[in-house]
Amino acid sequence: MNDLDVLASASSFESVGACITEDGEMTAGDERVEISPGQVSPSFFSTMRVRAATGRVLSADDFRQRADVVVVSDRLRRTHFAGRSLRGAVLTVEQDVNKRVT
Protein backbone atom coordinates (compact mmCIF):
# COMPACT_ATOMS: atom_id res chain seq x y z
CA MET A 1 0.00 0.00 0.00
CA ASN A 2 1.51 3.37 -0.97
CA ASP A 3 0.80 6.86 0.43
CA LEU A 4 -1.94 7.58 -2.09
CA ASP A 5 -3.70 4.33 -1.17
CA VAL A 6 -3.61 5.35 2.50
CA LEU A 7 -5.05 8.77 1.66
CA ALA A 8 -7.78 7.28 -0.53
CA SER A 9 -8.84 4.80 2.15
CA ALA A 10 -8.84 7.25 5.09
CA SER A 11 -12.35 7.58 6.47
CA SER A 12 -11.80 8.65 10.08
CA PHE A 13 -11.11 12.26 9.23
CA GLU A 14 -13.00 15.03 7.47
CA SER A 15 -10.02 15.53 5.13
CA VAL A 16 -6.51 14.10 4.74
CA GLY A 17 -3.54 15.66 2.94
CA ALA A 18 0.11 14.74 2.59
CA CYS A 19 3.35 16.63 2.02
CA ILE A 20 6.86 15.30 1.37
CA THR A 21 9.87 17.67 1.36
CA GLU A 22 13.59 17.30 0.71
CA ASP A 23 16.66 19.52 0.41
CA GLY A 24 17.26 21.09 -2.98
CA GLU A 25 18.21 24.11 -5.02
CA MET A 26 16.36 26.46 -7.29
CA THR A 27 17.64 28.86 -9.90
CA ALA A 28 15.95 32.03 -11.03
CA GLY A 29 18.09 33.79 -13.61
CA ASP A 30 21.65 33.63 -12.26
CA GLU A 31 20.60 33.23 -8.63
CA ARG A 32 20.92 29.81 -6.90
CA VAL A 33 18.85 29.40 -3.76
CA GLU A 34 18.73 26.49 -1.30
CA ILE A 35 15.12 25.45 -0.85
CA SER A 36 13.04 22.58 0.52
CA PRO A 37 11.03 21.49 -2.52
CA GLY A 38 8.11 19.26 -1.81
CA GLN A 39 5.24 17.36 -3.28
CA VAL A 40 1.73 17.55 -1.92
CA SER A 41 -1.42 15.54 -2.34
CA PRO A 42 -4.34 17.14 -4.23
CA SER A 43 -6.16 17.77 -0.94
CA PHE A 44 -3.18 19.25 0.96
CA PHE A 45 -4.01 22.96 0.71
CA SER A 46 -7.73 22.56 1.43
CA THR A 47 -7.02 20.20 4.36
CA MET A 48 -4.57 22.70 5.87
CA ARG A 49 -7.00 25.52 5.00
CA VAL A 50 -4.18 27.36 3.23
CA ARG A 51 -5.00 30.30 0.99
CA ALA A 52 -2.56 31.96 -1.37
CA ALA A 53 -1.38 35.45 -0.38
CA THR A 54 -0.93 36.16 -4.08
CA GLY A 55 -1.56 33.97 -7.10
CA ARG A 56 -3.20 30.64 -6.32
CA VAL A 57 -2.58 27.22 -4.83
CA LEU A 58 -2.57 24.06 -6.94
CA SER A 59 -5.87 22.98 -8.42
CA ALA A 60 -7.35 19.55 -9.07
CA ASP A 61 -6.75 20.21 -12.79
CA ASP A 62 -3.03 20.76 -12.10
CA PHE A 63 -2.86 17.24 -10.64
CA ARG A 64 -4.99 15.62 -13.35
CA GLN A 65 -2.91 17.24 -16.08
CA ARG A 66 0.37 16.65 -14.22
CA ALA A 67 1.10 20.33 -14.86
CA ASP A 68 4.64 21.64 -14.38
CA VAL A 69 3.71 24.29 -11.82
CA VAL A 70 4.97 25.29 -8.39
CA VAL A 71 3.71 27.20 -5.40
CA VAL A 72 6.32 29.55 -3.91
CA SER A 73 6.23 30.15 -0.15
CA ASP A 74 5.66 33.68 1.06
CA ARG A 75 9.04 33.62 2.84
CA LEU A 76 10.90 32.60 -0.34
CA ARG A 77 9.04 35.27 -2.33
CA ARG A 78 9.78 38.03 0.20
CA THR A 79 13.44 37.00 0.68
CA HIS A 80 14.51 36.47 -2.93
CA PHE A 81 11.91 38.12 -5.14
CA ALA A 82 10.77 41.18 -3.15
CA GLY A 83 9.00 43.75 -5.28
CA ARG A 84 8.71 41.44 -8.30
CA SER A 85 5.68 39.56 -9.52
CA LEU A 86 6.37 35.86 -10.00
CA ARG A 87 3.11 35.12 -11.80
CA GLY A 88 4.07 33.24 -14.96
CA ALA A 89 7.80 33.27 -14.12
CA VAL A 90 9.77 30.16 -15.05
CA LEU A 91 12.00 28.68 -12.31
CA THR A 92 14.31 25.67 -12.47
CA VAL A 93 13.74 23.40 -9.48
CA GLU A 94 16.10 20.50 -8.72
CA GLN A 95 17.66 20.68 -12.17
CA ASP A 96 14.33 19.37 -13.39
CA VAL A 97 12.07 20.62 -16.11
CA ASN A 98 11.31 24.32 -15.72
CA LYS A 99 8.25 24.91 -13.58
CA ARG A 100 5.80 27.76 -14.01
CA VAL A 101 4.83 29.73 -10.91
CA THR A 102 1.10 29.72 -10.20
Image (cartoon, rainbow, N blue to C red):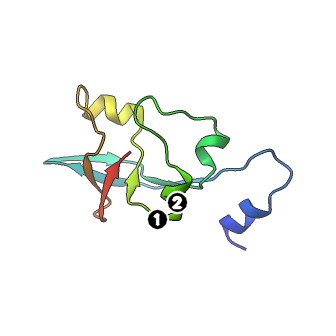
Q: Residue at x 28, y 38 (%)?
A: 86
Q: Which residue is mark 1?
A: 66
Q: Residue at x 40, y 31 (%)?
A: 54
Within 10 Å of disc 1 (Cα), the crowding (few <14, some 14-19, many 20+) is few
95 and 47: which is toward the camera: 47
Three-letter amino acid code at the position of disc 2: Phe
- Whether tag 1 and tag 2 are in contact, CB under 8 A, the answer is yes
For marks 1 and 2, give the CA distance: 5 Å
Relative to 35, say whether 50 is above or below. above
Within 10 Å of disc 2 (Cα), the crowding (few <14, some 14-19, many 20+) is some
Q: Residue furthest right?
A: 12
- Residue 77: x %, y % from top left: 33, 34
Q: How many marks?
A: 2
Three-letter amino acid code at the position of disc 1: Arg
Res 74 → quadrant: top left
The circle on residue 46 is none
- Residue 69: x %, y % from top left: 39, 54
* Quadrant of the drawing holding the C terminus: top left
| Side of 1 where 42 appears, left or right | left
Q: Residue at x 32, y 28 (%)?
A: 78
Q: At numbered mark 2, what does the secondary structure look like: helix, strand or loop?
A: helix
Q: Residue at x 61, y 47 (%)?
A: 44
* Quadrant of the drawing holding the N terminus: bottom right
Q: At numbered mark 1, what does the secondary structure look like: helix, strand or loop?
A: loop
Relative to 10, say whether 1 is above or below. below
Q: Which residue is mark 2?
A: 63
- Residue 64: x %, y % from top left: 53, 63
